[in-house]
Image (cartoon, grey):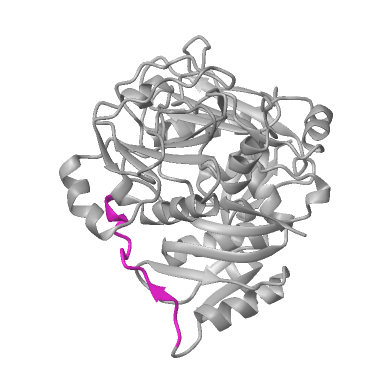
Amino acid sequence: MTLRVLFGLLATAVVAMSGQSPVSIKAGDPAPNLVWTRILHSADPAAPEPGSFFGRVTVLVFSPNVSADPHGISRWNELVAKFAEQPVAFVMITSEREEKLAAWLPDHAVSGWLLLDENRDSARAYGMELPGGVVIDRNGKVAGFTFHPDEREVRAVLEDRAVTIPDDADGAHMETTLASGAVRLDAEPHRLPTKPDIPPSYEVHISPATKRGTFISDGPDYFEHRGFRLRQVISDLWGKDANRVVLPASLDNEDRYDCVVALPHEMQQEAMHRLVQQAIERHFRVSVTAEIRPVDVYVMTVEEGKAPAKSADDGGGGGFEGVRWAVWDIAVDPQARTEKPRNYEMIREMMATAPVSEMSAMDITMERFCSILEERLNRPVIDETSLKGSYDIAVSGIAGTNEDLFRKLREQSGIVVTPAQRSVEMLVVRQLP
């Protein structure tokens, strides 16, 4: 039996719920009362109101821009359907302008409760600075927080198997806890990034990672990347895919680093990245230069007379601030007690090894799709499709090997991926004497 886990490789849009003061709330606390301006859609008329938490599990999702995320609504509706006739209430709360919702709702079904909270009072009560979810147990207490509630998490709360474990918890403790079939939720709401608590200066602090996991937080006057390998740090700073970074053997290892600077004033991102780049070169005594080299690659083309479906949005994004989903569906052996990754780097690592069974990318350019494939294939992928605009790509029934992925891509979308050699710009890192 396989456990099916969905991972989004493109960043989910982050829409800050501005004007809020952080509220101290955590798992185990009594669930704050819900406040709303209007009920836009009701669940079963016989069901208790959405704020009646006791005796059932309640799933709350705070979504500021409901109409701009049709794929998210589809996932929500599917989740609600899986718990029909079970003691679970689903409540989506939005602060989107009512006139926009009034024009959108007649043509779009939203399952469960949909509440309008114009002043974001409920969001503030739950400390939700970012879009996300909260699951409340049968006793009216917060079971935990999650970016996107899924079936596994909801069922775990329903069956009293949900736990909260700190990101920096001891690995053996985490494995022992999860071995019992427990499912992890976050103990606190996801917060907006804050400036590192160090004296402002132009000094870039580079040191071995102090905690497990990875963390990224950038602002106009600070840069904070923690827990990344040197290859990924260089990839992010120089704007080049990690597979196009050539490291000397002495630095091509599993060591992870924290890289942090808090500036005395705001700085353009390009200038800040230059500052951190120079610090990286000094600290590791290396030079980083771009060079054209012949390398093994995969070339992506389109089969004659066949092409993926053009996206309805075609790059417009439907007014949604952020990047659309590109989701891989990974089959994981539950006996391995594999837990859903908690951060970007862990997702990258699992993607490099886990067998792929399904893949979909919505409203995506060929250039960005190549970048996603490159992360999976660990080799540069070159776009030679000549396709412009955005496309929807869905591939299913993959046996798990790269060869089968390529075959299914060709059969189901017309995309052809073949090994080749091309001259590619690479970032070459050289150790200085």
Residue 246 in the figure: left or right of residue 224 = right
In x, y percent, where is residue 330?
A: 66, 58
Secondary structure mostly taken by the magenta-highlighted segment of the chain: loop
Between residues 232 and 102, which one lies in front from this camera angle? Answer: 102
Residue found 66% across the figure and 42% down from its top: 341
Residue 27 in the figure: left or right of residue 384 = right
Instruction: Give the magenta range.
Output: 306-320
In x, y percent, where is residue 432?
A: 70, 37
Between residues 178 and 259, which one lies in front from this camera angle? Answer: 178
Q: Can residue 418 be seen in this view?
A: no
Check residue 322 for magenta coloring.
Answer: no
Residue found 62% across the figure and 71% down from its top: 298
In x, y percent, where is residue 252?
A: 75, 44
Residue found 49% across the figure and 56% down from its top: 78
- Looking at the image, is 187 positioned above or below residue 244? above
Between residues 339 and 60, which one lies in front from this camera angle? Answer: 60
Name the residue furthest left. Answer: 99
Where the C terminus falls, by quadrant?
top right
Residue found 60% across the figure and 61% down from its top: 374
Residue 354 in the figure: left or right of residue 280 = right
Q: In which quarter of the image is residue 15?
A: top left
